[in-house]
Image: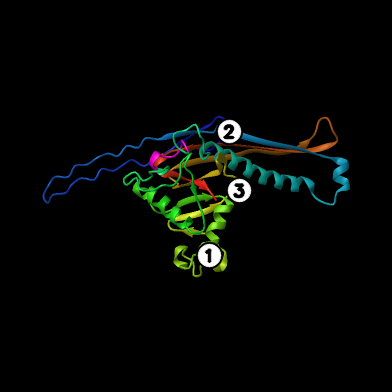
Amino acid sequence: MEIKKYGDTVVIRTVAPITMKKYVVGQDLEDERPVSTPTSLSIDQGYYWSVLLDDVMDVQSDLNLLDRWTDEAGRQQKITIETDIFSTFFAPTAANSYVMGQCHAYNQGLTAGVKSQAYNIGAYGSPVTFDKANVLEYIVDAESCLTEQNVPNDRMWMIIPVWFAGLIKKSDLKNASITGDSVSVMRNGRLGEIDMFTLYVSNLLPTISDGVTCTAIPFGHPFGPSFAAQLTETETLRAQRAFADKVRGLIIYGAKILKTEAVGALYGHK
């Protein structure tokens, strides 16, 4: 559906599970009618911006200030929404049993891995220390956690802080095939795909004090989170109480974790 206003609800269609049945030659086949259970996403978050350009200031400037300010508003909008979403879903907290309440219990912690419980990827009170020698091992462990949840190995993602990206670039990536590139990361500085993950660098991930400053590094698959947004209003008009033009904008959005088993978190520090 089209998002028109704050408070709208988006219905998210899901794929119904299919039952696999044992086949015996000559048997009559049993049919099923798959029934999916849709879920809803509330568009219940919003931010606005509003700026005034006085006529005198407009005349004296050799720049199109309204256009510049509108571009800057778009940049700040991206930062604000990402910070909000990261803080809502990916913020480590001492109050929770797990680093991130939105993650499946076996996609984080000291005994991650729903089948093996074999991966220590950090928990509050016991953060891991990432360095250039072990950073790739933790990325592989994160992929193993999702694979044990039967999450598809295509389109996996990981959002990493700047310092984590630095460790990857300093690591001994001599095997160019790790990233699928023709040359290694050490040679061209490109940060793209490692193992099954596409890596995205962000400076907006929240941190927590846990002896040292620690970060929860989220990873997952598009099956996990859902996000919908709409820029509902952008308008230019004359100000009523000043000799000035006004430009203002409004964006509304909603976000939700649909499948916790498709989201996880490494937890630690540099």
The percent position of residue 132, horizontal first and vertical second, equals 51, 58
Whether residue 191 is visible to the viewer of this picture, yes or no, is no
Residue under circle 3?
A: 203
- Residue 135 counted in the magenta span: no
Report, in whole angstroms, how far the alpha carbon at label 1 lies from the one at label 3.
Answer: 21 Å
As shown in the figure, which amino acid type bears the numbered disc 1? Val
Main secondary structure of the magenta stretch? loop
As shown in the figure, which amino acid type bears the numbered disc 2? Gln
Residue under circle 2?
A: 45
Residue under circle 1?
A: 185
As shown in the figure, which amino acid type bears the numbered disc 3? Asn
The stretch in magenta equals: 100-106
Report, in whole angstroms, how far the alpha carbon at label 2 lies from the one at label 3.
Answer: 22 Å
Q: Dot 2, crowdedness within 10 Å: few (<14), some or many (≥20)?
A: some
Report, in whole angstroms, how far the alpha carbon at label 1 lies from the one at label 2.
Answer: 39 Å
Q: Residue at x 86, y 43 (%)?
A: 57
Q: Residue 5: which disc?
A: none
The answer to which of marks 2 and 3 sits earlier in the sequence is: 2
Q: Dot 1, crowdedness within 10 Å: few (<14), some or many (≥20)?
A: many
The percent position of residue 130, horizontal first and vertical second, equals 50, 52
Q: Is residue 61 depicted above or below 190 in this figure?
A: above
The answer to which of marks 1 and 3 sits earlier in the sequence is: 1
